Amino acid sequence: MGFFRTVLGFFGFGVGVTMGLVIGYYLFIYFQPTDVKDPVIRPLVELDTKSLESMLPEVPHWVKNPDFDRAICKTAKEIAKPIIAENTAKYKIDSVEFETLTLGSLPPTFQGMKVYTTDEQELIMEPSIKWAGNPNITVVVKAFGLKATAQVIDLHVFALPRITLKPLVPSFPCFAKIVVSLMEKPHVDFGLKLLGADLMAIPGLYVFVQEIIKTQVANMYLWPKVLEVPIMDPAKAQKKPVGILHVNIVRAVKLTKKDFLGKSDPYVKLKLTEEKLPSKKTSVKRSNLNPEWNEDFKLVVKDPESQALELTVYDWEQVGKHDKIGMSVIPLKELIPDEAKSLTLDLHKTMDANDPANDKFRGQLTVDVTYKPFKEGDSDVDTSDESGTIEKAPDGTPEGGGLLVVIVHEAQDVEGKHHTNPYVRIVFRGEERKTKHIKKNRDPRWEQEFQFVCEEPPINDKMQIEVISRPPSIGIHSKENLGYVVISLADVINNKRINEKYHLIDSKNGRIQLELQWRTS
């Protein structure tokens, strides 16, 4: 009985599955649900923004925003004008005009790109560009009293341009101009329809047109010829020096007592506002509330309308922070050029006119100041790398002397044992200048400029430049030397300018890029 039950159960399962499949297929084929409706087909122009974004997430800019299309097409027309003008005269054609010119909906593709920098403050990009576009280009040609309309079809372009952004500047957009050139003749493939027929099918015409396009474009932009697109005035971006401020710190009287025994050890720090250079300092006068200095300083001015001379008197302390006695400011716009002015200034705690702490008398500081702007034309001297010329020193430069300029660009592969927070220290004739420090960076970039006024050419002098790592504010480690270089200034004086990368002494792989200039009047 068990055997028969098993056999019948098996056949019952098989018959049931078979019948179920047959009935299900029949119902699927011959019966349709009543709640399913035919889809509604709507044109794209009727869709809302959200629906379009979900359907077309990566539409080219010139499709979403016609301003891109118009701007690029306008540029193309300007480039084509001289080419058309030259050939219309040669082949006795009356005129060639664009009836329509749009880019279509297919963007160019980048097959690859090389990007690199040089020692000349520039960024170079070399993309490989391919474009199989669907533009709408219709050209109207008039010749011998006849008019013909031709349409460009199946356009393919392959080009290898070099795009250079230079000079790199600290102001946005961080470069002053774009320079474009072609590294080889571009490949342009297209069809040309006239009265419904493809003119490119005419034997020899395709090759002839190809060579004309390649030759004309190459004559204009094949390297070393370039297309320059100015973005901003490099002089304004770099804020070139426009003059020198001569300052004589004469004396101070009735300074506030800061020391415990009723004395002070004053000295003066002076700098121009809007300037990243370190402050200059007078000598320290020990135990004196009425010190006399008679010390001279020269400060390079870049914007006399907005800059001011900031003077701060400190009480020197052997241990700990130096106490500020008081400060004062002289706006440069209040000075008459080339006219010496002697000023006695009240010292204040802050430069806030509403601060009640400024009512307290803190002493007075006497200074002599003279602003000497450059002679007319000096500040307009081209200092771009292409010209190779060097800006002249300002009018107040000592006769036979000049202005020594040091530009610290960047360093590479510097590394400390315990920390790498590098800054650069420059030592020249006892003067010390420092760049800002950059946290945790083995390849720091500073782009900071320092200037030294010299009474005579420092042809026999040397300059020591050190890369130092500043320790973290919290920790037990002290600062570390990451390497140094000693530069003989004879080459700078003779060549007027050097821009080189130096291998750092006492560093395994460290290098530093420095630019030095010698400017004379």
Image (cartoon, helix red, strand yellow):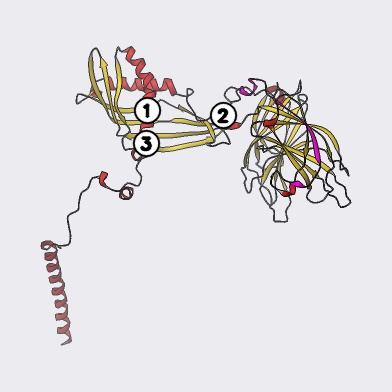
Q: Position of residue 3 (x, y in %)?
A: 17, 84
- CA gap between label 2 and label 1 equals 26 Å
Q: Position of residue 282 (x, y in %)?
A: 80, 37
Residue 234 badge: 2
Question: Which is more toward the observer, 343 or 445?
Answer: 343
SS at mark 3 in the image? loop
Question: Which is more toward the observer, 465 or 384?
Answer: 384
- Determine which residue is flagged by label 1: 74
* Number of numbered callouts drawn: 3
Q: Amino acid at mark 2?
A: Pro
Residue 108 badge: 3
Specify the quadrant that holds the C terminus.
top right
The image quarter containing residue 432 is top right
Magenta span of residues: 358-382
Mark closest to the chain's N terminus, 1 or 3: 1
Residue 350 badge: none
Q: Amino acid at mark 3?
A: Pro
SS at mark 2 in the image? helix
